[in-house]
Image (tube, grey):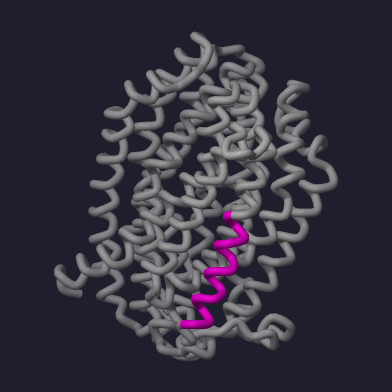
């Protein structure tokens, strides 16, 4: 692929996806940012409560990666019928998962919150948020599959617009519903939950209407009710491993929050703000991974292995640059974040050091996000990520974090530093695995029956 064509794809695919990731992160962080003005307990409670949406998003991420892998390659092979069938049965599975999470957060929010913290105030506040926001899981589950499809069929800019408008509505509703403006009652954490439900509902309706208007791929009931057996087998062959990888990584990451949640309210509040900053600024890194996955998948679907290898190399270089710039950006805005954060003196001191840690974390995350979360799954190479995350998180980082916090009783900051070494450790084996090029595979049904499946 000529360099000019590659850069065109970056601007038309990677940048819209990156901006969309930013808007999704902003939507997730908006509740915490605005509730910080209500009180530290409200901020901390919602930060902990949203960890259940984080776990939900992990399951969706596995479904999205599995769907994107097949859709990108079949779209590259110009098999729109296969794309439509894959989209249908993935919507079915996403809907079932969404219904389970909606029921759990509606019926047992106090029990779920008690798993995250032993602070009674935080449990009560978080339970109120979970109960009201429970229906949003149903909207998110389907809309994210629709948005994934739009990105893979060349409508990345349109999907970006949907997410952008959704966030704008979310933020606009947060102000009156949380603080009681314009005749609305001051609902606090429940107001943040209501605005989430409304904005997510709009995203779902818009994304489905857009797919229907484009008309290239449709959501058909027969594909939901009676999935294509062969494609479903291919999907689960890879997605089960991806789901294991996401859960291994995500549950490990949630353990970080649990560990910090038992180190006091100041540690929870500082960690919440640090995570907001980190999530908002690593979106460009995530955009590179998603765009790389789609572009490489399209090339592999049409057996352009040389082009896929070249695109992977260029994305690696670009991701390294983006990662360093992201880290430098975190350092640059650190004084402003510290000035604006409404925290106790102790939590303020914690946050000051945590932001330094976020800078090197973001630089490493850029490379692992591109490889493990992007171009490896694009070619069906999913087992490496599961092995890497299992060893790094559950054999190394989580045990050390538990020992540091509850056995060695190290200071909070040292615990936080140790818990944020996982991406740096994973980056080394990920880059070594990338150079072996085992991820260059065509996984479409036609390729599986021919000698062109693997270069």
- Residue 254 part of the magenta-drawn span: no
- Judged from this view, the residue extending furthest toward the top is 345
Residue 227's image quarter? bottom right
Give the x, y percent position of residue 129. 70, 39
- Locate residue 402 relative to residue 379 in the image: left or right: right
- Could you say which is closer to the camera, residue 226 or residue 102? 102
**Magenta region, mostly helix, strand or loop?**
helix
- Could you say which is closer to the camera, residue 342 or residue 116? 342
Q: Magenta part of the protein: which range?
A: 199-213
Residue 225 in view: yes
- Judged from this view, the residue extending furthest toward the front is 183
- Locate residue 447 relative to residue 1 in the image: left or right: right
Considering the image in quadrants, where does the C terminus appear?
bottom left
- Locate residue 330 relative to residue 224 in the image: left or right: left
Give the x, y percent position of residue 122. 71, 26
Residue 433 in view: no
Residue 280's image quarter? top left
Give the x, y percent position of residue 235. 60, 74
Query: Which residue is pictured at 65% across the width and 77% down the height?
Result: 89
Q: Relative to 1, is 437 above or below?
A: above
Query: Which residue is pictured at 54% across the width and 44% down the height?
Result: 28
Considering the image in quadrants, where does the N terminus appear?
bottom left
- Judged from this view, the residue extending furthest toward the right is 107
Query: Which residue is pictured at 46% across the width and 83% down the height?
Result: 214
Residue 410's image quarter? top right
Q: Relative to 90, is 217 above or below?
A: below
- Could you say which is closer to the camera, residue 343 or residue 425? 343
Give the x, y percent position of residue 196. 61, 49
């Amino acid at each position: 692929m000529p360099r000019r064509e590659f850069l065109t794809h970056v601007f038309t695919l990677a940048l819209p996806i990156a901006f969309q990731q930013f808007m999704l992160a902003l939507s997730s962080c908006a509740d915490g940012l605005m509730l910080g003005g209500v009180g530290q307990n409200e901020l901390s409670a919602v930060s902990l409560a949203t960890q259940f949406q984080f776990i939900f998003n992990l399951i969706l991420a596995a479904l999205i990666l599995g769907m994107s892998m097949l859709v990108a390659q079949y779209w590259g092979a110009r098999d729109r019928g296969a794309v439509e069938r894959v989209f249908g049965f993935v919507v079915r599975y996403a809907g079932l998962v969404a219904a389970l999470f909606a029921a759990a957060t509606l019926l047992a929010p106090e029990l779920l919150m008690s798993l995250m913290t032993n602070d009674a105030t935080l449990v009560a506040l978080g339970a109120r948020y979970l109960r009201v926001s429970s229906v949003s899981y149903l909207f998110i589950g389907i809309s994210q599959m629709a948005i994934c499809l739009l990105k893979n069929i060349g409508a990345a800019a349109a999907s970006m617009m949907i997410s952008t408008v959704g966030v704008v509505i979310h933020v606009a509703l947060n102000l009156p519903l949380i603080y009681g403006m314009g005749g609305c009652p001051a609902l606090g954490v429940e107001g943040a939950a209501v605005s989430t439900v409304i904005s997510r509902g709009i995203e779902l309706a818009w994304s489905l209407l857009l797919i229907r208007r484009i008309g290239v791929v449709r959501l058909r009931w027969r594909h939901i009710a009676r999935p294509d057996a062969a494609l479903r087998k291919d999907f689960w062959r890879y997605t089960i491993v991806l789901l294991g990888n996401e859960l291994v990584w995500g549950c490990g990451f949630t353990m970080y929050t649990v560990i910090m949640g038992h180190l006091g309210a100041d540690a929870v509040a500082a960690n919440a703000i640090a995570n907001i900053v980190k999530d908002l600024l690593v979106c460009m890194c995530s955009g590179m991974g998603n765009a790389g996955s789609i572009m490489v998948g399209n090339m592999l679907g049409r057996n352009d292995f040389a082009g896929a290898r070249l695109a992977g190399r260029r994305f690696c270089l670009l991701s390294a640059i983006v990662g360093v710039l992201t880290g430098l950006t975190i350092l640059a805005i650190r004084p402003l974040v510290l000035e604006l954060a409404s925290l106790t003196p102790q939590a303020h001191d914690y946050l000051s050091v945590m932001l330094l840690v976020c800078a090197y974390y973001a630089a490493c995350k850029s490379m692992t996000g591109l490889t493990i979360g992007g171009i490896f799954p694009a070619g069906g190479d999913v087992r490496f990520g599961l092995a890497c995350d299992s060893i790094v998180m559950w054999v190394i980082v989580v045990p050390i974090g538990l020992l540091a916090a509850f056995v060695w009783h190290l200071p909070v900051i040292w615990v936080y530093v140790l818990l944020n070494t996982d991406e740096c450790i994973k980056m080394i084996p990920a880059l070594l695995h990338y150079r072996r090029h085992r991820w260059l595979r065509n996984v479409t049904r036609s390729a599986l029956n021919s000698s062109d499946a693997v270069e």
